Structure formats: structure tokens, C-alpha cells
Image (cartoon, helix red, strand yellow):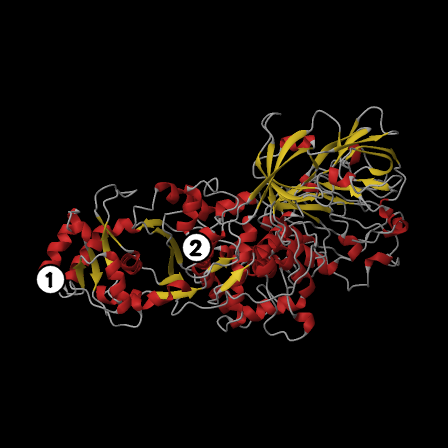
Amino acid sequence: MNIVPPEIQHNPKYWPWFKIHAGDDPLFRQYEIDLPIEDIEGEQEWQQGQQHDWTKPAQIILSGRRPGPNFQLRYSEKRKPNTHPTGKAGPPSSQQLCRRCRTTFTSDSVRPNSDNRTPPPWAGPTRPPLTSSSSTNLVSVLPQALLLVVGSSMEIKSLSFPADSPPLSVITAAKIAALPFTADPSAAPESPPSFLFSNGLKLDGTYVLLRYIGGIASIPDFYGKNAYDAAQIDEWLEYAPIFSSGSAFENACKYVDDYLRGRTFLVAHCLTIADIATWSLLAGTGQRWESLRKSKKYQNLVRWFNSILTEHNNVLSDVTATYVGKRGTGKPVAAKSKENQGVSQSAKSVNGDASGKAVSKSSSFEVDLPDAEPGNVKLRFAPEPSGYLHIGHSKAALLNKYFAERYGGTFIVRFDDTNPAKESNEFVDNLLIDIDTLGIKYETVTYTSDYFPQLMEMAESLILQGKAYVDDTPREEMQKQRMDGIESKCRNNSVEENLKLWKEMITGSESGLRCCLRGKLDMQDPNKSLRDPVYYRCNPIPHHRIGSKYKIYPTYDFACPFVDSIEGITHALRSSEYHDRNAQYYRIQEDMGLRKVHIYEFSRLNMVYTLLSKRKLLWFVQNGKVDGWDDPRFPTVQGIVRRGLKIEALIQFILEQGASKNLNLMEWDKLWTINKKIIDPVCPRHTAVVEDRRVLLTLTNGPEQPFVRAIPRHKKYEGAGEKATTFTNRIWLDQADAEVLTVDEEVTLMDWGNTIIKVIEKDQGGKVTQLTGVLHLEGSVKTTKWKLTWLPEINELVNLTLMEFDYLITKKKLEEGEDFLDVLNPCTKKETAAIGDANMRKLKRGEILQLERKGYFRCDVPYLRPSKPIVLFAIPDGRQQTSLK
């Protein structure tokens, strides 16, 4: 903002007259007017409580809050005499600040002195005379310098917000309005975004900040041309959050699309904060909006969205790349030129520090569910409670969530609890915890066991219809017959015989335990899943929910198509490994006489050196090869999070794979690279020295008395706070660092300065035992080869155990029929004793940090007492992992 030049400020011939009205509207904030002012009404508390000498500029402070949508400034060019109406040199003592007007600043700007005085240089071109009742918008009437009069000392110091929920609309509006600010993503979770001003004042709330930006921006009519426009903008600000509601998203798109028919902007005929808020919320939904945007479904909405993106491409690309990332806007659909190819995928941290760039690419999520009707889609995630959620399940869960939100449908969790031998309440509880960890919201939780009575009735009905039969053929023989297409001897039993054996199964009798119920489909079908699949088996083991009530349980193949249809599921998402069973699924629903449920396939997520079979993972748990289902070597959600993976990285990684049906073997390095880009910009830095053969360096000219200095925990992120570093004349170095040093070599001690190595002492084995050096703090750190981490020799240092992990198997991919026991990794864990700086006593469990020059770590066991070390888990950074020794 321009400031009125002093030579003009102090020249009386340019002093305007002001009549200012301000009230106590709850949306007011403090303003400062730094121009000479006369004729003042209202309770005005003069600077330091004294009258001003009106031969000098005055400063008036209006206390209150930012004016609302009726904020206007009226002025007239009528001329007044050279003196104050009272004939005094200052404001009349009887006048008070008017409290009648709540939302309007009114200014009568006049040129005192003679009628022939020219306007001041900062007043802009001469305008036609206005009457005292003429009114127009502040932005369009006042010269730029005078605009500064309102709020010139209210500079935005910072915008604070929680790192996991940046206020995209506020950031976008401020960037477009060219308002300088510092992003501070260190606010507590769930807290509203806030502006902190240079004078200590503060504003909270997304739409309060948007209104503030609209009021001070130099963009014409950014908050409306008049009170009616401003009211319409407020309506849109209240409506816009509907785009964040999964169930209402499609309906909102349709409403806005219809509204924009024949319109270029949401309000009036220019860009306003209503457009910015709505655009930002759409862009923030990521691939959900992108999929619709590339379709022809909402052409008016897409036209409007693309026009804004094209007009403000640089700003919008930067903001969405930083705060939306891979879920960004891609490129404008109608744009052809390179400069309009939309939002670049700059990999940036939450505080805006660029950490690399990548080329934008479309996500394979941009597919449609067959016959899906917006608002009438219902999906389910149906895990078996026989283990913890792993990375493969996460893809299925997130895909269901994505499509439910995209079509404005509903999403439920159903536990397929049909095998009591494998299931437990522990798995149910932890699966729900894992689903919550993924940030997935569901409508309700159901259980297949809730439908056991109806399933038994359906089974008996199929027996009566001749569509199912009871078979007592031994399991191995039955499997061979199915492979060879040979009918069972029981296939043509009478209905009466089948019902008799069915009752034996229900009671769990000796003869019943030898039987199973099979569907009578087609034993000659090339698709072997249709060769009379098993519908029910006997199992006397108590169920984790309903105890010993039942002795028979339905198979997944029988229960799933029944419950899907009964619960109103419209689309069943299944991984492509079940492809051959799709025909069976549809045939069983047909035999049951139930509504058909659409199947949508996606590729299973496979990772190198990784077992995802719950049966195989259970083997590791039961045989003590790992410490539990949350072991950091496990591919479970709890395991990889415990190792240090941020859930945002997992979600981004999975969403990048999309709903493609192509089978892929994914590298872990890609996932850990995404994770590094998230944690590196914000995680604090600490120092550790490996305990084994650590070396003492004596600085002969070091400080005689230790002193402490506070330094940042992260040099580029203030939100990480500070740490206390002690400087002494005796410091510890790693043996590995000491071994590379030579006499008279100058090295840099990180966060201190340079030192020159004078003496190197070694033992008979050639290992360095002690060093002597002299500080050379005036030396340049740019010229040294070695930058060394160090710790002071003090009692406050803490003991550490650094844990590194490797894959559980040594082969990238197991071939069909290959036994995983033949490729077990003999060494999957390595412990290293170390000492760390005293600040690490404050670490909390789960906190992620970087040990300088050693990598990223997650605190698994925090400081308890001196004898018990802090346990830190090493976090892979995406570089090729080497085997542990």
C-alpha cells in the first residue's frame, strides 16, 4: 500500500476534512487513520488523551471490528471555508464519536483554503463534483494512497492453521489479492485459521478472514459493489462448504451448474470472494471433482472453473500444488497452450517450502461405476475379522470411500464374520481403529452374523427348490471331483434326504459334522467356481459374537451375495483376484431370487518383499518372529504407522494407484519417498552419537565454563520450536567421523563453527581414541570438507536405542506354489546403542524427528528414567534399502 508522502501530509493545503462514523458492530476490528482530520464526531480517545495541534497531521484510532458487507465510504467535493466551523484550531470539545452507524464509514473529503487550490498529487485524476449524498464503493472512488488510510498499520503478519486442514480459500484469496503473509501450519488440530496482525490483533475463522480480505483487497468489488452484492456473497460463503459433504457433493454441483447458466461469475459481473471460496472447495476435493470436470456432466460449472483457473493460473497452480498436491486440479480441460496446463505438482511441504517438482498426471481413479445413479449408490467395506488391516485392505477401503463420496452415496462397514475359527473381537476392534486412522467415515457397522437366521432360511429354501444339496463326500475327494468335473454321489439325493441331513448339520451331530451344503449349479462349467460350490459347513467352535448358538456357518461365497442384496448395496468392489467368482456371485443371487448387485473390480495392491496373506502373517505372530500385528516390519496399517509412515502419505500413495485393474508390484521406496516429503519440512532436528567407540574431542581454546544457547529445532520451520544446546571445551564425536579426519584439517562443527584438528590418538587396532583441536570460529564453513555432528560432554545426555528394520522375506515376489518359509530373512532387526542431546527427554511417543546426518526416526518409547533408553525406529527415506548385518 502507498503511503501519503510526508511533504503532502504536512502541507495544510492538502488536508482533507473527515466526518467518520463507526459503531460497535461485532465484525469490527481496529483501524488507524494517519491523515490530518477535523470535524470529528464520536467518542474519540485522542492519542495519549490530549488535544492535537491541528497545524500537524493527526492520528485517529477507531476501535472496534472490521465492518460488514455495508462497508462504504462516501465523500463529496464541495468546498468549505479555511477554518473549522467552530473557528477553533482543533476539534470542538463538545463533539463525540457517533455510535449510531454500525457498519458504515462516512467521509466528507474537502479541500480547505482557497477555492482554486489544485488537488494533491496523490488524489488521482480530477473527478466530476459529487453531491453530499453521492455514494460509491471505497475501492472505486478513493485514490490508492487514501485507501491506505484505512488499515495502513494492520499488516498481516501470519496465517496460522492446522497442518492437516489448510484453509485453501483463504490462502487463495490472499494470494490473488497480493496480500503478503507467512503461512504457519502449526495450529492445534481442529482450530480455526487465524490472521495475526502486526499490531497484535487477531481474526479467527475461514469466512471472517475471507470477508476481511474482500474488504481490504485492491481488486474492484471483491466483496461486492453494494450491500446487495455483499449479502449475495455471504450467501455463497455459507453455501460453499456443502462441497465438502460427500453425500451432497453431486447435488451441489448440479445446483451451481444450473445457476451458472448464462452467468460468468457467481455474484454480479466480476470475480468476488464467493467465486474464490467455491472454486477452492471444489479444487480441494481432488480427484472427485477432477473426474466430473473431465466429463460433460456439468458444462457450465466446468466452464466457470476453467476460466478462473486460466485467469489466475500461476497463483492457483502454486496454491493447489502446495496444499492439494497430487489431488490437485490437473490442467484446464479446454486449455491447449503450455502456459495453461493447470496446476503443477510441485511437491511442497505444508509450510510452503518447495522440496521438488514433478509433472502433473491424471489419476486412474477417473472411472465410473456401472449404472451408478448419484444419490442412490451404497457401498460396503467387508473385511474378515481375522487379522489387522493391512496396506492391501486400505486400498479397498479408500476406494469404497471415494466412490461413495463421488456419487453422493452411503458407505458402511460390514464384518464378514462367518469363520469362528479365525475371528475374534480383538480383530474387530482393531479393524475399526485402523479404518478410523485412515480417516474413513462410515454410516454404520453391520455383521454377516446378524443375518444368520435369514441365511439359514434361504439355504433351506434352496434345498426345497432342488437348488442345493447336502454332501458327505470327504473334503479332499470333493476338491478332486470339482477339478475333474465329476458329480458327487449325493448330488441327486431327494429333497427329503437333504433336509434330513441338513437338520443333522444344524444339531452338529456326528453324521452332520461330516456333511456340507453345496449349491447345485453346473459341474461341467469351464469356470470351476460354478462347479457346485460349498454354501454351509459345520463348525462347533463358538462364535466371537454369538457364542455356541450355531454349529453351522455359511461360506463367504454364499453369504456375501445374499447380504449385499439384502442391505441394499448397489456396487460391490472386489479385487481382481476374485474375477472367476463373479459369475458365481451373480448365479447365486439369481438362484436366491434377489436384486442383482453390480461388481466393480480393481487390482490388488501388491508390494515387493511383502506377504499380505493374513494366514501367513498370523504365522509370524504365532511363532514369535514379530512382536505382534503392529510390528514395524508388518504391512499392517498399525505396523507401518508405528514405523513412521504418515497416514497422509499412505492415502496419497493408494490414491495414485487408482481404481485400475492392471496388476502391479509396487516398490516400498515410492511410498517412503512420499512420506519424506511430508515429514522433512516440519520434523525437528536432534543430534545423536553412536555409543560404540565414541571419541572425545578436546578444544584447547574452547569455553572454560559451559554455556547454553537456544537454537531452532528446524532452521526453516519456526513451528518446531527451539532446543537448548550446551557448548563446552570437550565434545563427543562418532567413531566413523573421527576416522576420516587428518591432523591440521579444518572441519565444521554443526551449529557452532570451524575447528582445526591438531592431535589424533589411536589404539593398536587403528581406532581413534581421542582428538585435540582448536576452535577457528572465523573460518568459512563453505571451505570445509566435513560437517560433523557432536554432543557436549555433560551428564544430561540421554541413552538411545536406534532400531533399523528389514523385509521379512528375501524374494521380491513369491511364485505360485512357492513356500514363504523357504525365503525367510534371517536378520530383520538391528539395534544400535547411542547417546542423544538432552532435549530428547521431551519427546513423546509417536513424535517424528530427524537425527542430523543419521536419518528420520519415530519415537516408540519416550524418556522414562536414565536407566531406560529412548527407543527410536528408523524411518526409510525412499533410497534403496541395504540389508542389515
Task: Say which of marks 1 and 2 sits in front.
Answer: 2
How crowded pointer 2 is (Cα within 10 Å; few <14, some 14-19, many 20+) is rated as few
Asked which quadrant contains residue 347, the reply is: bottom right
Q: Is residue 221 above or below residue 845?
A: below
Query: Left or right: where does residue 477 sit relative to residue 602?
Result: left
Q: Can the viewer see residue 400?
A: yes
Q: Nearer the viewer, residue 499 or 240?
A: 499
Disc 2 residue type (three-letter): Asp
Which secondary structure lies at badge 2?
A: loop
Sooner in the amino-acid sequence: mark 1 or mark 2: 1
Q: Can the viewer see residue 20?
A: no
User: Quarter holding the C terminus?
Assistant: top right
Residue 495, labelled with which disc?
1
Q: Nearer the viewer, residue 130 or 234?
A: 234
Which secondary structure lies at badge 1?
A: helix
Q: Is residue 425 above or below residue 465?
A: above
What residue would you read off at disc 2? 819
Please report the residue visible at 31 percent of the width from the left and 68 percent of the height from the top.
583
Q: Position of residue 132 (x, y in %)?
A: 72, 56
Query: Left or right: where does residue 264 sit relative to residue 152?
Result: left
Q: Nearer the viewer, residue 85 or 90?
A: 90
Q: Position of residue 753 (x, y in %)?
A: 84, 38
Residue 213, labelled with which disc?
none
Instruction: Report, in whole angstroms, how far the alpha carbon at label 1 lies from the one at label 2.
Output: 43 Å
Disc 1 residue type (three-letter): Val
Q: Position of residue 473 (x, y in %)?
A: 20, 58
Please report the residue visible at 12 percent of the width from the left and 63 percent of the height from the top.
493
Q: Are marks 1 and 2 in contact (CB under 8 Å)?
A: no
Query: Left or right: where does residue 838 sit relative to residue 769?
Result: left
